[in-house]
């Protein structure tokens, strides 16, 4: 048996190399004869494998003859294809000048589709045949839709299919490495490696565990690469942009398929995703000229495309997180997920589907591995931003922000809670959850209320002393998602989206007031209902949960991610701009009484500024900021969450944060904060009485000159 498998492995390797070379040849085919030759050779490969498949379907001397005749018939058809291609080229040459260039292939799309279909057919037949030759034929037949889908899933999930397909993809990428942009080549190689790391390929527990973790890590790295690529490349080739969105949704299907494979032992969805990924991969490499560097799109002006990008990444990560949790925790995780039967009337089915879907999303996004995975991905983007940041204060805040995410999103609510309180329910299901929840009620004990009161005291004190940024840009888990390089660049949608524009400026618009009022009302009503429920005066649940637990799950485990993927429509940092986060609203109330504000060293610099980079860089859309600086020299807004992009963006180094530290410094007579040296053009604009030294203008760009005074 070992010798047989070795021979089959060598044959599979040879076929993978031959197929990859034919795909390279197909990508270079420009004449009817060349295209026909490629199709002929692919049909020959299909004929050989198809004939073997006929024999292994019912091994006998008769089936051997039948397989021979099937192979011969397919080869005969392939010869006809070459002959027709030859006639077409002769016909075209007869109508052209003999000295002219060779005729051009007329039906490029049809040729590409033929190549893709033949490659898929060859791989499917080879997977089935080699599996049977190795002594483990696919059980069952292919009659009926159910049998066909199960048979297809068994073929695609076999190592003969997955490993051969992965080798073909790698070799194809290698052959075309000089014709593809580096970013495209990197994505194609990652796809091939992820295909190789398919858990269903081998029925070995160690492989299933290791491949899940390695493939998840590789996908996280791929997503980070794509996000950083978009940040560095505002103009993306149209063909590559379409490819990115399509393969992200294919990966979303693949992660869902792997989750169902692990939980329900069904690999149908996974098999469909693999076939879709193959078709997508070869559709690109057969026609690499479609990635025209001159045909580009500004992705920040394409909200629909950006939404598809974010939604595809989120759905992939949702099922990836569920897969990791199910692999690590097994029935402990899966048994907590509701599974109401989808049976009964239409209304019952719709309600049960919504119930199951809501709690699947809520429990998965609150799970340890999903949050850890998101932290790795978005934290890497924040680390990239950290390298570009010049302000030491902003660097310190970014470091604290990443540490707070690791502590408050991953360690304490999951690892620490389960270790210290192993006998208690999950922290996400307890109605008293401290500052992240707002107001809880369940066990009516001094300790429970002490947690709530202490958390509010800490929240209020931090907001009073340092402003809202202590919560909304440091302690909270949301800023890690919003402040990475690529996501931060999406703040342009705050000014381009019709919905996001309703929340611009520091004013409390009607939309903002209505959103905040609705959120705070829901918090009060849920808290009262929870109190009455815990004291036995009321029996009220929402989707089977305590009202405050449901409210927490709805706002922070479902709605937050819905609004995150809809950044192109709702704007960036929408939990702050729209006012739907009640924790932020409470922090905002304390911050309005405190010290925090933005100040400038010299109002004249702002009056003569023509760039208003501070307003353009603000992630919460405080577009009226420059007017306040020009009039009063400071800006104070309840919406300001102190990210610091405005301070970084100011080309004159004229802005700084003001909080309790400056108040103490002035009260103790320590002296004012050292003032930076202004640029030469800024000095001349405000009277020429500044020191001669200058400070860098930021990122190597020369600031615009001031206009002359009227």
Image (cartoon, rainbow, N blue to C red):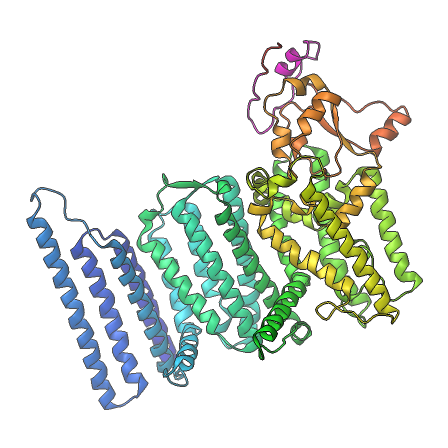
The front one of 293 and 24 is 293
Q: Quadrant where the N terminus lies?
A: bottom left
Task: Give how far across and how far down residue 257 sits, in percent.
Answer: 51, 69
| Displayed quadrant of residue 213 | bottom right
- Specify the segment rendered in magenta: 679-705
* Residue 602 against residue 657 in the figure, above or below: above
**Quadrant including the C terminus:** top right
In this view, 150 is above or below 103? below
Residue 287 percent location from the top left of the image: 31, 52
113 is within the stretch colored magenta: no
Q: Main secondary structure of the magenta part?
A: loop
Looking at the image, residue 376 sits to the left or right of residue 303; the answer is right
The stretch drawn in magenta includes residue 702: yes
Between 573 and 49, the one nearer to me in the picture: 573
Residue 649 visible, this angle: no
**Residue at 58%, 52% in the rendered image:** 565
Q: Residue at x 31, y 70 (%)?
A: 121
Look at 41% across and 64% down and name the residue there. Answer: 276
């Amino acid at each position: 048996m070992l010798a047989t498998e070795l021979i089959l492995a060598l044959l599979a390797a040879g076929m993978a190399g031959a197929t990859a070379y034919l795909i390279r040849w197909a990508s270079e085919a420009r004449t009817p004869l060349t295209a026909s030759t490629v199709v002929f050779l692919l049909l020959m490969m299909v004929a050989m494998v198809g004939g073997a498949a006929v024999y292994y379907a019912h091994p006998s001397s008769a089936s051997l003859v039948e397989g021979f005749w099937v192979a011969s018939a397919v080869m005969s058809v392939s010869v006809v294809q070459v002959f027709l291609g030859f006639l077409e080229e002769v016909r075209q040459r007869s109508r052209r000048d003999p000295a002219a260039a060779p005729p051009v292939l007329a039906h490029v799309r049809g040729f590409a589709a033929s190549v893709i279909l033949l490659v898929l057919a060859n791989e499917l037949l080879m997977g089935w045949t080699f599996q049977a030759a190795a002594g483990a034929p696919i059980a069952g037949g292919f009659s009926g839709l159910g049998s066909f889908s199960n048979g297809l899933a068994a073929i695609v999930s076999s190592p003969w299919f997955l490993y051969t397909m992965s080798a073909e993809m790698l070799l194809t990428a290698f052959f075309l490495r000089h014709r593809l942009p580096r970013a495209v080549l990197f994505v194609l190689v990652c796809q091939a490696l992820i295909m190789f790391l398919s858990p269903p390929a081998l029925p070995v527990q160690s492989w299933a565990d290791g491949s899940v973790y390695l493939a998840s890590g590789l996908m996280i790295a791929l997503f980070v690469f794509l996000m950083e690529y978009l940040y560095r490349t505002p103009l993306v080739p149209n063909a590559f942009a379409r490819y990115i969105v399509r393969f992200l949704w294919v990966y979303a299907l693949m992660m869902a398929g792997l989750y169902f494979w692990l939980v329900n032992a069904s690999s149908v969805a996974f098999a469909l995703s693999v076939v879709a990924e193959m078709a997508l991969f070869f559709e690109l490499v057969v026609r690499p000229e479609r990635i025209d560097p001159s045909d580009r799109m500004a992705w920040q002006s394409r909200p629909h495309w950006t939404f598809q990008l974010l939604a595809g990444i989120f759905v992939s990560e949702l099922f990836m997180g569920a897969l990791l949790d199910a692999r690590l925790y097994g029935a402990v995780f899966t048994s907590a997920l509701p599974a109401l039967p989808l049976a009964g009337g239409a209304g019952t089915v719709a309600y049960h589907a919504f119930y199951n879907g809501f709690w699947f999303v809520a429990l998965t996004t609150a799970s340890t591995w999903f949050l850890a995975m998101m932290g790795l991905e978005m934290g890497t983007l924040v680390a990239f931003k950290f390298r570009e940041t010049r302000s030491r204060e902003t660097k310190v805040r970014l470091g604290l922000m990443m540490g707070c995410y690791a502590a408050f999103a991953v360690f304490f609510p999951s690892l620490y809670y389960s270790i210290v309180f192993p006998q208690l329910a999950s922290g996400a299901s307890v109605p008293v959850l401290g500052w992240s929840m707002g107001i809880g009620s369940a066990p009516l004990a001094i300790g429970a209320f002490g947690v709530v009161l202490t958390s509010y005291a800490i929240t209020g004190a931090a907001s009073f002393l340092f402003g809202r940024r202590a919560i909304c840009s440091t302690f909270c888990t949301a800023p890690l998602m919003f402040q990475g390089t690529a996501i931060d660049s999406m703040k342009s949608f705050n000014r381009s989206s019709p919905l996001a524009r309703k929340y611009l400026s520091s004013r409390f618009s009607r939309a903002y007031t209505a959103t905040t009022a609705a959120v705070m009302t829901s918090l009060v009503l849920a808290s009262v209902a929870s109190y009455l429920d815990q004291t036995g005066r009321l029996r009220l649940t929402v989707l089977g949960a305590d009202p405050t637990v449901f409210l927490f799950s709805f706002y922070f485990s479902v709605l937050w991610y819905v609004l995150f993927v809809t950044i192109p429509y709702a704007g960036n940092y929408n939990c702050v701009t729209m006012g739907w986060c009640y924790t932020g609203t409470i922090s905002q109330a304390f911050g309005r009484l405190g010290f925090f504000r933005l100040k400038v060293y010299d109002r004249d610099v702002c009056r003569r500024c023509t760039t208003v980079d501070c307003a353009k860089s603000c992630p919460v859309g405080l577009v009226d900021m420059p007017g306040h600086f020009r009039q009063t020299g400071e800006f104070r807004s309840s919406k300001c969450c102190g990210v610091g992009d405005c301070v970084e963006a100011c080309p004159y180094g004229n802005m700084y944060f003001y909080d309790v530290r400056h108040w103490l410094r002035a009260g103790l007579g320590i002296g004012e904060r050292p003032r930076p040296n202004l640029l030469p053009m800024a000095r001349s604009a405000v009277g020429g009485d500044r020191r001669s030294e200058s400070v860098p203008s930021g990122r190597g760009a020369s600031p615009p000159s001031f206009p002359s005074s009227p």
